[in-house]
Amino acid sequence: MSDLDGAIDLNRAALALRPPGNSDHSMSLNNLAISLWHRFKQRGVRSDLDEAIDLLRAALALRPPGHSDRSVSLNNLAVSFGYRFKQRGVLSDLDEAIDLHRAALSLCPPGHPDRSMCLNNLAISLWEGFKQRGVLSDLDEAIDLHRAALALRPPGRSDHSASLNNLAISLQDRFKQRGVLSDLDEAIDLNRAVLALHPPGHSDHTMSLNNLASSLQDRFKQRGVLSDLDEAIDLNQAALALCPPGHSDQSMPLNNLAISLQDRFKQRGVLSDLDEAIDLHRAALALHPPGHSGRSASLNNLANSLMDRFKERGVRSDLDEAIDLHRVALSLYPPGHSDQSKSLNNLAISLQDRFKQQGVLSDLDEAIDLNRVALSLCPPGHSGRSTSLNNLALSLQDRFKQRGVLCDLDEAIDLHRAALSLRPPGHSNQSMSLNNLGNSLIDRFEQQDVLSDLDEAIDLYRAALSLCPPGHSH
């Protein structure tokens, strides 16, 4: 019997000696729950977590408003729901965790010793909610809470680096949604500060290398400054060197280095970078066999790199393999999964590319159907809506060019307008949306000879050009 099993048995015995009505009954409920919770984290047995949640509910019921331990019970139950959500993906568990964290925070006013912990816990659960539902107000609130937590964890505190890291991740996610570069610049500065606190030999050094590399890579994609990409590659190579074959964390640096090499290939056109990226993605996929939670992401990453090589070399087997990989990845995302719309988009794009190569209209029709489903999963307010609007518009535009059905083009124009409205001045993808709408208006002008379409297209192109100063990579 392990020490943990022994502790659980002792806590069960203690609970039996403190039946309902005993002044220490709630404490014994809590202690047994915590020991079961720790065993769940060690062994992953769901029944341990379910029992812990039931015990924590019972303990909370015995600690009504005004009880000195109520905030602790609220927090413990919230954290347990958070773990169960990560295991099973049931959003009601996450919603309950958020409500409990809010209640715990309300009992920890400014000056309370547990306030920074409660701020951090609520922020993380809201961030998880944003990842699932794409509601930006959740992400904004998470960032505000992380800032407040960081203010209570100054340099020198053991949890200072964790708060820096949490704020950096949230800001980087917001940049990806709104395209405001100041968020990304701040995330990079925070990631540099975290790495300085995690020097070689620190248990989190590899993770900090990865995080800084990721944020530099995102900035490269926006500003096109190759020094950011080169630094990201150096950081990813350093992280991979610390995770040799057999290391439990090797798949992350394999994947990150592959993506950064893929980006450098797109800039410099050196095919050896792309070939190496594909080999790294294959190695990462081998570490994610069927049943692994990271398999779908690895399938997508390898498929995307094969698509890039197909566009460069035109080898049909790369394209066909990419489509097969995207289909498998999509099959691993059940309805309601937060990444299903992205997977639908990836398969749609690869089918659209195959249509452009082989001219088989069934590929394009399937791509349009997939894009419609992806858009339905990104309702107004969803962070991925502008991308889905754009993708569906482009596929309809391609079908118009083949079949000449004006309703496809009219719908594409409406979709491009809707996408542009979600990419206001300052958004990193505004110039692309301006160009896309301009192109669709030119297509309609060529069909109907309406000068207002031509005039509007020219204005849009001028606006797009003004957003791309000399030396801009796009």
Image (cartoon, grey):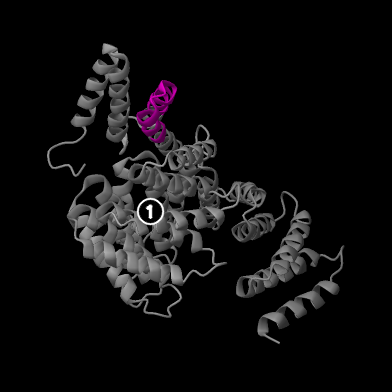
At x 34% / y 55%, what residue is drawn? 316
Q: Which residue is mark 1?
A: 168
Q: Position of residue 300 (x, y in %)?
A: 43, 57
Secondary structure, mark 1, is helix
At x 75% / y 57%, what residue is drawn? 57
Q: Quadrant of residue 10?
A: bottom right
The stretch of residues the image draws in magenta is: 395-418
Question: Is 106 contained in the magenta span?
Answer: no
* Position above or below: 410 against 327: above
State the quadrant of the C terminus: top left
Q: Position of residue 94 (x, y in %)?
A: 62, 51
Name the residue nearer the viewer: 137 or 314: 314
Left or right of residue 314, residue 286 in this image: right
Main secondary structure of the magenta stretch: helix
At x 38% / y 47%, what residue is drawn? 354
Q: Position of residue 421 (x, y in %)?
A: 38, 27
